[in-house]
């Protein structure tokens, strides 16, 4: 053992500097930082397209986009936010925190880690190209399908769709590799005494998420491959005229697409399970039931996909099954939210920014979850389906559920990552502006949907004008508020009050025993966990 | 390159687990075409 | 039931109206439009029930969390209860909470069963009116299966639509009788569309190669508006659906008139007469502006790159043969559909003549219905 340690010691002395440090990096913290910076960049790109959508919808009539460009931007917003911003942000935090939290020196497969990150910029390039090639001569038509890419519409689109298919393949490979790495790290690299059921819930959340990714990402890869074959190689997987089935693609897409929602949300829930106990100054209420509920969510989430397709004309028995299955998901989700509230109960709470975001997530995610139950009820869903009500619902799920969870995690661990405390006053201003404008933006969209405004339309009748106006104005404020977030993060990286090893009074866990920022190889000698 | 201080046995174990998971992902990918299609269609036909 | 729900509804939206401080206007849509079928009314009640349950639960969650925020905070000197998760409540909550949620879930799922079954299983009875609804990029085609009457329904441009109804108004309405079950058969000629008229309580996808069914018995006369609900490409926003529900006798009258008009049009097209340029141009202009202009534009300049221009194009200024051919059979792999099933010889002759002589294309070619007939 000692000889291995000696040779290894000389090995980790010469880590590269400059651009080589990043390009050749095998260090989980550097790669985590890269992931987070990448996600932040894409978050602003996706935000820009959201601003374009809201600006277009400010008034009835065509303002400054044409319908194809509008549909293009709409597709772009969803894909960039999901694949470019939220998933890499989650992966970045996982990279940074999992080795620290389980007492490992690094991720299990550092070179694979490098690969899975550096596929991403290439994939992002493809993704962005797919939106801009139509503007070059001979570039074909724009992608006007929405992120769901339903054929036959997606077969009509020009070569930009091929770029997109390739981008999805690359993104899929990247996240499957990252998931493999996370699973192996969690299985093999835990410190002595760190049993699976002593592991922080954040690690559990990622463990479950990584399995979900490996199970569903290859399915969408299969789906878009068939789409590619239909477009270019004369197959008829989805072409009814050739004996294929256009609905098959919808099944394959949502078999991936529904678990994808949990892929986005579970890491955020895991982060909340760290943040809420820290600022309530007492242990998480119901550790085992939280972990169990996450496993149940993952399992149930895999078998209810067709609730996105109630209108395709399935049999009564099939839709009834999907309805009941979907409603049952409220049980594990409700249990997790209950555990969070019970953790706050009889605690000694303080409300630093991570806790503000965590509380907002508990409340607003409950709201989004409840409209989710309403949507699961088929007769009513037949009215909500593909209307602005759905848009409001999933933004209430994904913004509080995924993005507020990520904000809570970022503010909670920023001192650990940078070694500096962030500007608490500015961060609180950011929270309030962000949270209020978010609610104004999306709350009114429920009414638009109920009154009959379909989603994904560029122009609308005057009866929808007032709420769209409110939504757009608030939406522009909501978008701009993120510039403040950028400023806070840059300010924190550049300096600030020095952070202690344990940056928060109530924080528990191995990551707070290391210096802030932690040494190059996080845990050179594994800690002993009682 | 600066790889972490990990002993050879763990490295081997890591590689084995990763290959296993990778193989699993590839199986899932190829299963998506015939397998899931059949599963979904059988289920829906049965329910019809 | 409905009256009570309306009271609840107005209370439920009160906070929002106060917050937005906007003048309350009648056409503010806050909830479903008034339902016009028994099932749509059941759906409305179910929607209000689930929304009510959700609201109560949400108020509960907010109440508990805000109480906790107020009471259990460090600044008030509250000492955390480190053993709260080890009390009997902590030990058993994992089973108590799911059991309670399951109760709510079953209430909701149970109350949905009856109306789900009723709306989902289309009755197979005599005397139903069958209407085949075909989605096209970007208009609807309705076919009354029993009488063979076919109508196309397109959005009216802004200057022709009724006041305040732009994007909700069409040239030809779908006329339906009240108090008679109507079976809708949905399909599509190109990409997926979805027919959605909120007042009728259904939404169904139109999928090429599939025929999906829905049904409705309208019991209130009136005009009901809806829109296409499945993203179908460029002009997804311009596919309104307007249903006009009239009494059975008015419906029969309308049907007879429509039939007579159709017979007259067919006779005109079949008549072997030589059409003059001004007549064909005038007919062609009207047809072009409704059927072709959404892609190729009124000015014939198209929308690049998806929709090529006709003004000065090789097809519209070259020989007539390929021009008639592309209108009849469409262009595979592009958005150009075949029109041979939808337009008669006279209509196609008029459109082709118009395209060859409008916007400075002045070829002087005059295409007669018999040329089209020969090319079919």
Image: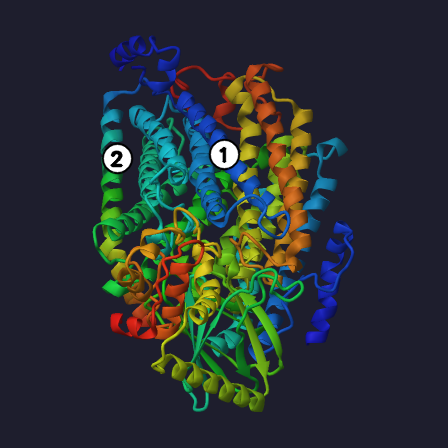
Quadrant in the picture for residue A181: top left
Within 10 Å of disc 2 (Cα), the crowding (few <14, some 14-19, many 20+) is some
Q: Is residue A446 left or right of residue A139?
A: right
Quadrant in the picture for residue A160: top left
Q: Nearer the viewer, residue A464 or A101?
A: A464
Q: Nearer the viewer, residue A296 or A281?
A: A296
Of circles 1 and 2, the one toward us is: 1
Determine the secondary structure under disc 1: helix
Within 10 Å of disc 1 (Cα), the crowding (few <14, some 14-19, many 20+) is some
Instruction: Give me the C-alpha separation between circle 1 and circle 2.
Output: 37 Å
Q: Which mark is residue B17?
A: 2
- Relative image position of residue A103 (x, y in whole percent): 41, 25
- Relative image position of residue C11 (x, y in whole percent): 75, 62
Q: Is residue C328 left or right of residue C182?
A: left
Image position of C258 with respect to A416: above or below? below
Residue at 24% across / 43% down in the picture? B26
Image position of A187 with respect to C242: above or below? above
Residue at 35% across / 63% down in the picture? C365
Q: Which mark is residue A45?
A: 1
Indicate how the structure is coloured in the image. rainbow
């Amino acid at each position: 053992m000692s000889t291995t340690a000696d040779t290894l010691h000389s090995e980790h002395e010469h880590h590269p500097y400059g651009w080589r440090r990043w390009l050749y990096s095998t260090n989980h913290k550097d790669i985590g930082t890269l992931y987070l910076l990448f996600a932040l960049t894409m978050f602003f790109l996706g935000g820009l397209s959201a601003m374009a959508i809201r600006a277009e919808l400010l008034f009835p009539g065509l303002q400054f986009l044409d319908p194809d460009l509008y549909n293009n931007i709409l597709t772009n917003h969803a894909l960039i936010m999901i694949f470019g911003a939220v998933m890499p942000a989650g992966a970045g935090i996982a990279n940074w925190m999992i080795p620290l939290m389980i007492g490992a020196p690094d991720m299990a497969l550092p070179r694979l880690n490098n690969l899975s990150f550096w596929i991403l910029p290439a994939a992002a390039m493809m993704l962005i190209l797919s939106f801009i090639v139509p503007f070059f001569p001979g570039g074909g038509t724009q992608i006007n399908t929405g992120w769901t890419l339903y054929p036959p519409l997606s077969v009509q689109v020009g070569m930009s769709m091929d770029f997109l298919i390739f981008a999805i393949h690359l993104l899929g490979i990247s996240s499957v590799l990252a998931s493999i790495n996370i699973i192996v790290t969690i299985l093999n690299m835990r410190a002595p005494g760190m049993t699976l059921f002593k592991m922080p819930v954040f690690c559990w959340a990622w463990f479950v998420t990584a399995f979900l990714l490996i199970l569903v990402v290859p399915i969408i890869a299969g789906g878009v491959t068939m789409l590619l074959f239909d477009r270019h190689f004369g197959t008829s997987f989805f072409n009814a005229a050739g004996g294929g089935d256009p609905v098959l693609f919808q099944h394959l897409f949502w078999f991936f697409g529904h678990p994808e929602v949990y892929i986005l949300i579970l890491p955020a829930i895991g982060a909340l399970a760290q943040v809420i106990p820290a600022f309530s100054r007492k242990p998480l209420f119901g550790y085992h039931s939280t972990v169990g509920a996450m496993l149940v969510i993952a399992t149930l989430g895999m078998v209810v996909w067709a609730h996105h397709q109630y209108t395709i004309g399935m049999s009564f028995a099939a839709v009834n099954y999907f309805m009941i299955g979907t409603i049952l998901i409220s049980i594990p989700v409700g249990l997790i939210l209950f555990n969070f509230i019970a953790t706050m109960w009889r605690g000694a709470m303080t409300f630093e920014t991570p806790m503000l975001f965590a509380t907002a997530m508990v409340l607003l995610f409950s709201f989004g979850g409840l409209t989710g139950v309403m949507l699961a009820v088929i007769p009513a869903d037949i009215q909500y389906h593909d209307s602005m009500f759905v848009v409001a619902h999933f933004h209430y799920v994904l913004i509080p559920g995924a993005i507020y969870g990520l904000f809570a995690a970022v503010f909670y661990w920023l001192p650990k990552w940078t070694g500096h405390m962030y500007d608490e006053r500015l961060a609180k201003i950011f929270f309030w502006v962000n949270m209020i404008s978010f609610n104004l933006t999306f709350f009114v969209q429920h009414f638009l949907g109920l009154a009959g405004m379909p989603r994904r339309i560029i122009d609308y009748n005057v009866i929808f004008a007032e709420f769209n106006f409110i939504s757009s104005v608030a939406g522009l404020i909501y978008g701009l508020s993120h510039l403040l977030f950028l400023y806070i993060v840059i300010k924190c990286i550049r300096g600030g009050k020095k952070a202690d090893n344990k940056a928060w009074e109530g924080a528990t866990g191995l990551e707070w025993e290391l210096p802030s920022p932690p040494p190059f190889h996080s845990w050179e000698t594994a800690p002993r966990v009682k | 390159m600066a790889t972490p201080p990990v002993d050879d046995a763990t490295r081997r174990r890591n590689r084995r687990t990763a290959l296993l998971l990778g193989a699993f992902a590839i199986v899932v990918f190829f299963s998506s075409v015939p397998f899931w299609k059949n599963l979904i269609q059988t289920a829906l036909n049965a329910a019809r | 039931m409905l009256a009570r729900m309306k009271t609840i509804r107005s209370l439920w939206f009160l906070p929002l109206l106060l917050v937005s401080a906007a003048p309350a206007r009648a056409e503010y849509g806050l909830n479903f439009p008034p339902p016009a079928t028994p099932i749509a009314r059941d759906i409305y009640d179910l929607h209000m029930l689930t929304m009510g349950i959700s609201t109560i639960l949400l108020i509960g969650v907010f109440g508990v969390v805000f109480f906790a925020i107020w009471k259990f905070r460090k600044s008030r000197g509250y000492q955390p209860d480190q053993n709260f998760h080890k009390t009997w409540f902590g030990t058993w909550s994992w089973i108590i909470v799911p059991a309670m949620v399951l109760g709510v879930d079953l209430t909701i799922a149970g109350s949905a069963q009856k109306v789900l079954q009723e709306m989902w299983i289309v009755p197979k009875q005599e005397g139903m009116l069958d209407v085949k609804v075909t989605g096209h990029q970007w208009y609807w085609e309705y076919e009354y299966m029993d009488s063979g009457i076919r109508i196309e329904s397109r959005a009216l441009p802004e200057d022709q639509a009724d006041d305040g109804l732009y994007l909700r108004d069409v040239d030809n309405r779908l006329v339906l009788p009240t108090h008679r079950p109507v079976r809708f058969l949905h399909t599509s000629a190109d990409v997926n569309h979805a027919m959605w008229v909120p007042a009728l309580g259904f939404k169904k996808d139109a999928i090429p190669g599939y025929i999906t069914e829905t049904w409705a018995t309208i019991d209130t006369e009136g005009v009901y508006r809806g829109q296409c609900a499945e993203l179908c490409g460029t002009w997804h926003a311009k596919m309104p659906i307007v249903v006009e529900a009239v009494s059975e006798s008015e419906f029969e009258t309308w049907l007879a008139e429509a039939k007579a008009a159709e017979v007259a049009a067919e006779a005109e097209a079949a008549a072997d007469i030589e059409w003059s340029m001004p007549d064909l141009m005038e007919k062609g202009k009207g047809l072009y502006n409704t059927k072709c202009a959404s892609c190729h534009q009124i000015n014939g300049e198209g929308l690049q790159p998806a929709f090529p221009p006709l003004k000065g194009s090789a097809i519209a200024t070259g020989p007539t043969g390929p021009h008639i051919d592309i209108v009849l059979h469409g262009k595979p792999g592009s958005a150009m559909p075949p029109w041979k099933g939808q337009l008669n010889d006279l209509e196609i002759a008029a459109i082709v003549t118009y395209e060859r002589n409008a916007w400075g294309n002045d070829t002087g070619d005059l295409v007669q219905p018999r040329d089209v007939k020969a090319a079919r």
